[in-house]
Amino acid sequence: MLRVKDYMSEHTISFPPDKSVGKVVEVMKALKHDGLPVITECDGEKHLIGIVTFMDLVGADPNESIENVMTRNVLSVSPAESIVSVAGLMAYNHIHHMPVIDHGKFVGFLTTSDIVRACIENMISENVERIMEIFRSLDREVSVKSGRTNVEGLIPTQKHLDSNELQLRRNEFNKGIIYPIIITKKNGKTYIIDGHHRTYVAYERGIKEIPVFYIEGDLGITETGDQLGLTIDELEIIDL
């Protein structure tokens, strides 16, 4: 089960209640955040007293303390909660920011962006499992681990890229969404199993490393890559 603790931000920026509205606006604009927690600290422990959002700050006196404009009595969740149930809670209450409280202490902050990331990674994990099941059905012994790999030198196992899907991947990269490709290795070479479009966009943008799921085992797909003998920049873009 996907849990809040796996996707929350433990070291999110926060404000003390006496911070001025003007300073908070300045920080939130610089960090491109639209909501952050307001906390007090006692004996090294953080305690939530509210959340300040841009909606709270609109029209407020820049010299006012955020304690006087912040949202109080906010909903919170525990780090052990299911991401799915919390996503439903946030959607039902139209909440974009959820503080995480453990035994009365503030321990993290969950946003709608974290929920989206959890959904994307879960979908990718399901895709990895589907691919592994295919290889297992062929009596291949396989295992998987996650990490990062260099884009340069990745070997394609297909010849073509769909121009429409390529544009979708470019749009995702524009938004900072770079989720893992699936690879395997043999004889010191690294082969792409899934994620050719994402790899191509990373290559054309000069991105050096990307996240991966690495499937270990003797996979026949490496032979396809060797037979094609292509590099990433040699993939052909076509309209499907």
Image: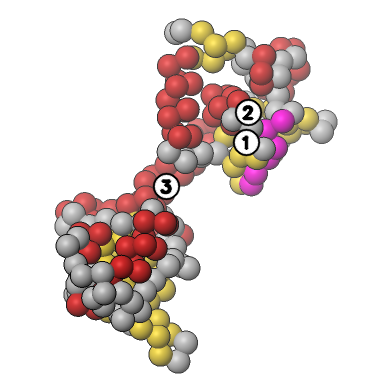
Residue type (three-letter) at the residue carrying disc 3:
Arg
Q: Which of marks 1 and 3 is nearer the N terminus?
A: 3
Q: Which residue is drawn at 21% across and 52% down?
A: 91
Residue type (three-letter) at the residue carrying disc 1:
Ile
Q: Which of marks 3 and 2 is nearer the N terminus?
A: 3
Comparing 167 with 3, the one in front is: 167
Residue 70: percent from the left, percent from the top?
22, 71
Residue 86: percent from the left, percent from the top?
28, 58
Residue type (three-letter) at the residue carrying disc 2:
Tyr
Viewport quadrant of the N terminus: bottom left
Q: Which mark is residue 207?
A: 1
Q: Residue at x 33, y 77 (%)?
A: 19
In the picture, measured across the screen, residue 236 lies left or right of residue 19, that is: right
Is 49 above or below relative to 148?
below
Please rate how many residues cluster around mark 1, counting C-alpha atoms within 10 Å: few if below 14, some from 14 to 19, many from 20.
Answer: some
The CA distance from mark 3 to mark 2 is 23 Å
The CA distance from mark 1 to mark 3 is 20 Å
Residue 151: percent from the left, percent from the top?
67, 33
Quarter of image, res 55: bottom left
Q: Which mark is residue 117?
A: 3
Q: Residue 203 carries which label?
A: 2
